Image (cartoon, rainbow, N blue to C red):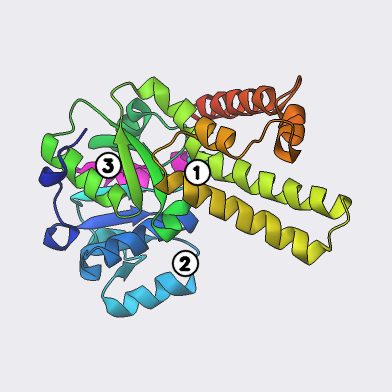
Amino acid sequence: MTDPSAVPSLDSFTGTLTLAGAGKMGGAMLAGWLAGGLAPERVAVIEPSPSDEIRALAQRGLKLNPVADNLGVADIVVLAVKPQTFGEAAPALRALVAPSTLVLSIMAGRTIGGIAKACGGAVVRAMPNTPAAIGRGMTVAVGAPTVTPAQRALATALLAATGRVEWVEDESLMDAVTAVSGSGPAYVFLLAEELARAGIAAGLPEALAMTLARETMAGAGELMHRSPLDAATLRQNVTSPGGTTAAALAVLMGEPGLRELMARAVAEATRRSRDLAS
């Protein structure tokens, strides 16, 4: 773990940062950095299809799609492009990277070795998730041996601007991290979809079923966030023997049940993350 006292404040950063890719995740991270005090004039964004929000930031001093020759070497390069397009983007990005540049990647599947070979620099590989857009993201990071303690602390500051950060030392864990937390919000949203659909099938009006599913998922998530109890204990606390919840859980926890489906889903996402590395 990085010592929180050693994590620098973003408003004290005096270098230059280039963000390659400002889609949903890159844009959410940028918003978190600026809210955390990073000066817009220290940021350059490379994004072929910038949103109106990103365009508006150019009025505050952010450099949007500057001429490559005017950029020069950056202190930090954040890679937020789609992993499938990284190969074609890498040659242009390499010109922005010196051996001392912190290269922070949030691309699924792309390995530290592959990124270092394509771009150079001191590489940190990270996997955030979409709740970063509201400051409730979960990010796991791993660094190359060339990453200094100061660079690790700076990477922590950048990633912590959108939520919680954990570090691992074994890069092979990142594919499973991607499958659990990177893709995980989609599993939760799917559960809300299907809960609403089941409510409609049970006779509820569509609007009410959607509201019940949405608020139940949000409330249960917030309860789990605030409670010191683990998920299993929280589940048991709401399950009375012989009651309605127990009847439903007998189906979800039967064979085949949610445990088997989730294990298969995470295994498949892990496999796909490994495939993206090639």
Is residue 175 shown in magenta? no
Mark 3 vs 2, N-terminal side = 2
Circle 3/circle 2 CB separation < 8 Å: no
Instruction: Identify the residue under disc 3.
Output: 103
**What's the CA distance linking mark 3 and mark 2?**
22 Å
Q: Is residue 130 above or below residue 148?
A: below
| Amino acid beneath label 1 | Thr
The part of the image, by quadrant, that contains residue 64 is bottom left
Determine the secondary structure under disc 3.
strand
Residue 83 lies, in percent from the top left, at 48, 40
Q: Earlier in the sequence, mark 3 or mark 1?
A: 1
Q: Which residue is mark 1?
A: 85
Position of residue 197 measured from the top left corner of the image (x, y, whole percent): 80, 51
Circle 2 sits in a helix, a strand or a loop, which is it?
loop
Q: Which residues are magenta?
A: 85-105
Q: Residue at x 30, y 48 (%)?
A: 159
Query: Is 104 covered by the magenta stretch?
Result: yes
Residue 16 or residue 230, whichever sits in front: 230
Q: Residue at x 74, y 28 (%)?
A: 250
- Asked if residue 242 shows in the view, the reply is yes
Query: How many residues crowd around disc 3 within 10 Å: few (fewer than 14), some, or many (20 or more)?
Result: many
Look at mark 2 in the image and give the residue it sits on.
50
Apparent side of residue 150 relative to residue 210 in the rendered image (left or right): left
Q: Label 2 sits on what residue type?
A: Pro
Residue kind at label 3, given as amino acid type: Val
Give the side of residue 140 with respect to residue 103, left or right: right
Q: Residue at x 42, y 53 (%)?
A: 132
